[in-house]
Image: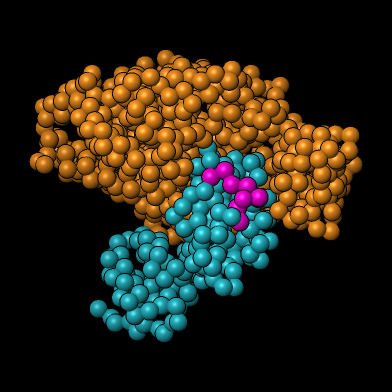
Amino acid sequence: MTCFIQPHHEDITQDMWQKIDAVIKDNKDISGAIITALRQCQDIVNYLPCELIDYIADGMNLPRSEVFGVASFYSLFSLKPKGRHTIKVCTGTACYVKGIREVINRIEGEFKLKEGGTTDDRRFSLEGVRCLGACGLAPVMVVGEDTHGDIAAENVIQSLEDYK
Amino acid sequence: MSKLTLGDLDLIREQTKDIIADPDVIRLMICGGTGCHATGSIKVKQTLFEEIEKRGLSDKVKIVETGCNGFCALGPLLVVQPEGIFYVKLKSEDIPELIEEQIINNTPVKRLLFKDPATKKRVAKQDDISFFANQMPRALRNKGLIDPEKIDDYIARDGYVGIVKVLKEMKPVDIIEQMTASCLRGRGGAGFPTGMKWDFARKSEGNTKYVLCNADEGDPGAFMDRSILEADPHCVLEGMTIAAKAINAEKGYIYCRTEYQLAIKRLKIAIEQAKEYGLLGKNILNTGFDFDVEIYQGAGAFVCGEETALMRSIEGKRGMPRPRPPFPAHKGLWEKPSILNNVETFSNVPQIMINVGNWYASVGTETSKGTKVFALSGDVNNIGLVEVPMGTTLRSLVFDIGGGISNKRKFKAVQLGGPSGGCVPEHLLDTPVGYEEIAKIGAIMGSGGAIVMNDKTCMVDMARFFMDFIQDESCGKCTPCREGTLRMLQILEKICDGKGEPKDIKNLEELSHVIHQSALCGLGQTAANPVLSALKYFRDEFDAHINEKICPAKRCVSMLKFEVDPDLCKKCGLCFKSCPADAITWKKKEVAVIDKDKCVKCMSCFDKCKFDSIF
């Protein structure tokens, strides 16, 4: 097996590289496993820097261009660093009808960030996601693992205070 | 556990049925769907355990965490069986009282029961609530009744009877005959006859074939597939196994949205258990038939709901559709014959095998048979999942089951079919649900999202919303969809921004026509539907935006003045309390005033004002 040199990257620790190598090893012989491999590596590093995408491509024996194509196609993958907490605001129809736009405006105004962006202190990333399938709780946002239902512009900032 | 024989399966069924039917045991069915988890059902369940333990009731009371009950807006939900007493919005603090009154004194706790929005009366039993009473559960027959993480519970509810019958008595042609007789059509939206699809794949030559389950539920406002997977994962596995037998496939994939982590977890458990029992894997029930299922997590691309795009995605490529023919039944995943059905379609299959096809087709309209699950949401009182026979009118769906419009507002439209569908106005509410019937009025059945909108919804803004969605999700492969939807979006944004011109309407119509004619896949071909239906039924709102620069529903921010009408203002101060920017001044018995320099145009005051006095 060819040994690939791990490029230096400030956001990837030695421990992370080991886990990444394990992911590549587990997936390299399964056809179609590149999306799974990218997802697992993103879970480790929290985003996919270009150097990492190239490294995964080489490890999986796939063209770098193809892997970059996949990583940039799917909305799950982020090529930019994310904040400590990701706020996923549901932009599905039910949430839209119930006023998620106003909630987003409020978050954007308060933390000076735009949908798809991250605050300068890397505290929050704000992502609009298409329907979380929890329309009964609309409007909905998910912060990390926590689902917050029935949120409104006037109380959303309060709900976010606990996430430091 | 060693692998089961047919006799073992019957034994498990009888034993589990006895346990469930034990008259001396009270079963507390706590909902463990995504919705109820989010509102705190895990904590409630924990408190229930502790309270039951503390009072030494563990032998008499059993706690079962079920999948999604369907009545999601009122979670956490608890149903006390066998009586069927239905509790809503429970908190941990309520549990001691609930145990004391309901379990020990056998009197329901009135304040925790469901309150009918129309009559304002508390209703004790689940079956007496109009939301449940008017339904016909088939695909959802096990929701709230079984523990989705226990295969024995599923077996006790006639689970895996269908596959036994198929493996023992039926040839592939027999399966297809029953599927054809059932007239089941694809529940993902397009409505292609399932029996016919399977027959094409059965006749396709090749030793390797695939059964694929589409659980990439992408339509905003649809959550039935999530609910089925969370509440009854085994019925989907059984349905897929029956399909595999029909087309002679050995391998299946469930392509599931990565957002649905609870569904994925329960599916994994279900697959594991089915394999342990020998109901999945090699030599199923010692009949020599092999079938294995793998879960594939999507990575967030709406277009992957399209069958050819979904297959490309499983192959590890960008999820882009390709022209058909060749159809997947001949060349699908890895160029092998494949069938793709969605979760709801598969979940109907075991019952069709048990009760035969004619039973399934016994309800419905002329061309649409059986039942359909709708996800009712938006500005309606009873929000949740409902399963009704085809032919039920939309009015019954919104007003009988849905309990009418919330917050005393007026009905404006119900949006069906997600971004490929359309809005149905009041005067067409007596349309029965069915593929052709809904298509005739400019919407589509789609996967079953039904979002109710009240008179505060701007239809131009909704058209813009859907076009924004489509434009964002367009994969970019074909020009009409990639460029055409962008132009349409720009026009709609311009209209919402108060800069619309009369020629815009004609341009929208022309672009719609071209995209419909020339886009590569269903996503593009139907992309203009929401705009066309809005133009058809709510033309006056477009005209008001363009000619008078007014948004009648007061949603389009750039056309609003953020002033208070003193004649309409009831001086209640709700706007003052809701303003996050301290831009409103108000004193008791005085009309509120908005300071435009401080106002951040967040719309909080518009939402709070009950008298529509801000404009």
Q: Main secondary structure of the magenta part?
A: loop
Q: Looking at the image, is B468 positioned above or below residue A6? A: above
Q: Looking at the image, is B220 positioned above or below residue B90? A: below
**Res B505 quadrant in image:** top right
Asked if residue B206 shows in the view, the reply is: no
Which shade is chain A? cyan
Q: Which quadrant holds the N terminus of chain B?
A: top left
Residue visible at 33% across and 20% down? Answer: B105
Q: Which residues are magenta?
A: A149-157
**Res B446 quadrant in image:** top right
In the image shown, does B93 or B164 lie closer to the viewer? B93
In the image: residue A147, left or right of residue B545: left
In the image: residue B336, left or right of residue B494: left
The residue sitting at the top extreme is B362
Which shade is chain B? orange
Residue visible at 59% across and 55% down? Answer: A158
Residue A146 location, x and y as percent? 46, 52
In the image: residue B102, left or right of residue B118: left
